[in-house]
Amino acid sequence: MTALHALRSSRPLVLALLLLLCAAPLLSSAGCSRPAAAQKPGSANKRKRRTSSARAGTLLGFIIARKYTTLRAPKNVFMLGGWRSISHWTKLLYLAPEGKKVKKGALVARFQFRHEKARSWIEKRIRKVEAEAQTSEIAEDKKLSDLLSERNKAVLSATTARLDTLKGALVSKNQLEVFKIIHKQALFEIDAVTQRIKAQRKQMRLARAYYKKSIERERSLMTRYHAYKNNYVLRAPHDGVVRHAYHRRRRRKVRKGDGMPAGLPVLHLGHDERLAVRFFVPEHRLREVRIGDTVTVVAGRKELAGKVFRIERFPQEMGFLQSMDSDELPNAREKAFVVVAEIGIAKLTAGNEVRVRLSAPDETSAPRRDNKRRRGGKRRKQRSAK
């Protein structure tokens, strides 16, 4: 009984020792973490938070020319006679340098043309039709010469038969009638051969016209071939400055060697050296920007001022504006307005992605609507009182 009583009396001491043993690792880890906190590792995290918060307050934009003409990738379709080729992508082989000043008609971009074999195929068809035309001409000439010789024979036999009809006193009456019949038959044969000669000459004219049209048709294939080939070459429609377009599928600027679908912008030919920024403003933030407002363009470490000069009327989905699917873009279904602000002449290249920060809303412009509403309310009350 005394031993059991001693164990029961020492139970609180045992529990206290167990608690101390369990709490020792926690106290040691807490003691080790204190010096690390003294080294201020959260400075990098603070910077990340600042950049992320600043990026969240800005809008996505792209550098473009102030006034430009867009040149797009051609349609990779080649259908000529029996030759048929369709592809959705075309490889860009040459692209004029960014910022290059070009004259009207100058080469600014060239795409891969993979239908060179069609030229030899067309030339072979032209030679074949020309050979058929020559063969037909020789054959028709031979037929005409045969008919002419046949008519000469018929004329000779008719002359002989006419001479026989003059032997009236030397032959019997029945023989004379036979000579007359032979003479009439010879004249009929001459007339028949003459009609055949006329038909043959008409056939020759028709054959020449047919083969002439056939040769023209085959040669027109060569003209169309060169027209198709010229579609793969982009030339400047006017004097200007080359500005590379933004490749939205690759999230970078267009460059040499890219495979491009038909209709994708390749470059923008600016009328001058002035630049602008094209950015997207969500619907709920449209009231923060107006024509003439000043925005801040953030390109890396540079910050430039831009003046808004155009706001498109109708909003579009962000997925459509950036040519991305909803799986690639979280806010693909969000609608936004396209806004363009002029930067002027700056040391930036078109096609780069930038961030745009809107200016603070003007406080003086907000109460105007309230004042108008109040005035309208007063007028209504006055009218109702009257």
Image (tube, rainbow, N blue to C red):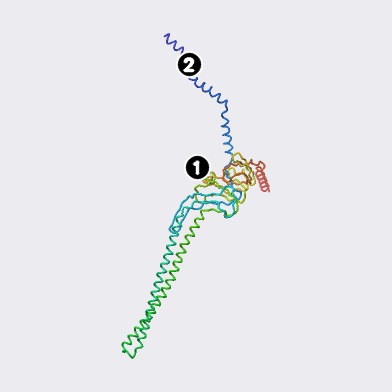
Distance between the Cα atoms at labels 2 and 1? 58 Å
Quadrant containing the N terminus in the rendered view: top left
Q: Residue furthest top?
A: 2
Up/down of 177 relative to 336, above or below: below
Where residue 86 appears, as percent x and y from the top left, is: 45, 53
Q: Which residue is mark 1?
A: 328
Label 1 secondary element: loop
Q: Amino acid at mark 2?
A: Leu
Q: Marks 1 and 2: in contact by CB < 8 Å?
A: no
Label 2 secondary element: helix
Instruction: Give the side of residue 280 with respect to residue 182, left or right.
Output: right
Where residue 274 appears, as percent x and y from the top left, is: 62, 48
Instruction: Give the side of residue 338 with respect to residue 89, left or right.
Output: right
Q: Which residue is mark 2?
A: 17
Q: Specify the label residue 180 is tagged with.
A: none
Up/down of 140 relative to 273, above or below: below
Identify the residue shown where x is 42% and y is 67%: 134
Instruction: Specify which label sits upstream in the sequence, 2 or 1.
Output: 2
Where residue 88 appears, as percent x and y from the top left, is: 47, 50
